[in-house]
Image (cartoon, helix red, strand yellow):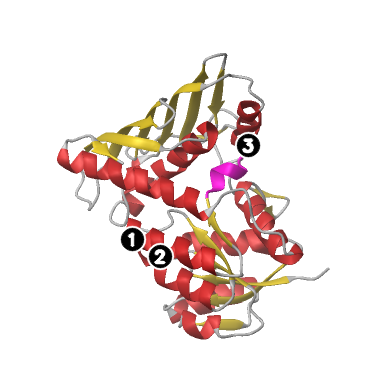
Amino acid sequence: MKKVKHGILGLGWFGEKHCEALAAIPNAEIYAVCTRNSERLAEVAKKFGVKKTFTDYHAMLADPELESVSITTMWDQHAAPAIAALQAGKHVFLEKPMASTVADCDAIVDAANAAKSFFMVGHICRFNPRYAAAKQEIEAGKIGKIISMYARRNLPAWVGASVLDKIGPIIGDGVHDTDLMFWFSGSRAVSAYAQTVQFRQHANPDLGHVMYRLESGASCILESVWCLPDTTPFQIDERLEVIGTEGSISIHDTHPNLMIVDSKGARCPDTTYWPTIHGQLRGALRDELAYFVNCVATGKKPTVITPEESREAVLACLAAEESARTGQVIRI
């Protein structure tokens, strides 16, 4: 079996998760890793047996044997390496959100459309089997025309505190549900209204509530609260309700699908996105990276999500953040 030589650019917590997922994909080879922190670089390279290491992504992209890359840097550092990788002829898997500004999104979309190589943004929820099954039912016309959607994606305070100085709840997690709403409805937002609450001393608010009006006429509500009690036994309270003219769909991807109670209390480990099963990473992250790697291996362009769809989700979330700042409805 031919293995795709893949590199990971950015070795924070999620960059390492990419390594774990790629290590469980038979036709993927972790060929190179890159980060500016030399100690972290050595640590990850040793853990996954990677011989090619770089502190400069330009040097990594110049390697002719490298075929594809994951870009897992912070969202405001996506544009330059993504565009450079595409211009270097590498296939690019870019983590969500696509970028931190609409201008950067536009530049990435233009580069992706001009490149001969493949490009895909990691909207992992499209690889969650529950959301994928819901999409099939909607496409089959089982619930009629969508008129209402409500999404909830709430996190314990300790999780929020770990990222609130880097990204806020509307774009940080709301981008998932914004994309799902657009994907399910085949529509996009024409207006956004949002409110936030901030009580901790971080750069971003602790919670955000968003209301979208879609081009189709549907009304959508999105809840992203990053300050549930620290004793919450799960890392995410994730739900989506879709109501159509002829039916409805309810998705509930949190406890108690697996609950463990021991001397320390109750906990609900992840069983969907990156669980470790029989010593290897499984779940939606591995599935979406396997999909991308197989596209590279077979020369088949990824179609699960387009660059333009990724851009629309960022555009809407940034409009919602602007609404929260100004108190005004933002027309998109």
Q: Amino acid at mark 3?
A: Ala
Q: Nearer the viewer, residue 134 or 156?
A: 134
Query: In the rendered structure, which segment of residues is drawn in magenta?
Result: 123-129
Mark 3 and mark 2 residues within 8 Å of each other at the beta carbon: no
- Please tell me whether residue 125 belongs to the stretch shown in magenta: yes
Q: Is residue 294 left or right of residue 50?
A: right
Image quadrant where residue 127 sits: top right
Residue 107 is marked as 2
Is there any visible trace of residue 264 in the rendered image? no
First in residue order: circle 3 vs circle 2? 2
Query: 318 and 264: which one is in front?
Result: 318
How far apart in space, not on screen, are marks 3 and 1 (Cα)?
30 Å
Nearer the observer: mark 3 or 2; the answer is 2
Tell me the residue that label 3 is attached to. Answer: 132
- Ranked by sequence position, the earlier of labels 3 and 1 is 1
Residue shown at 48%/79% (left/top)?
57
Mark 2, Cα crowd under 10 Å, few <14 / some 14-19 / many 20+, is some
The residue pinned by badge 1 equals 103
Q: Residue at x 46, y 79 (%)?
A: 39
Numbered disc 1: secondary structure: helix
Q: What amino acid type is highlighted by mark number 1?
A: Ala
Taking 137 as reference, is 221 left or right?
Answer: left
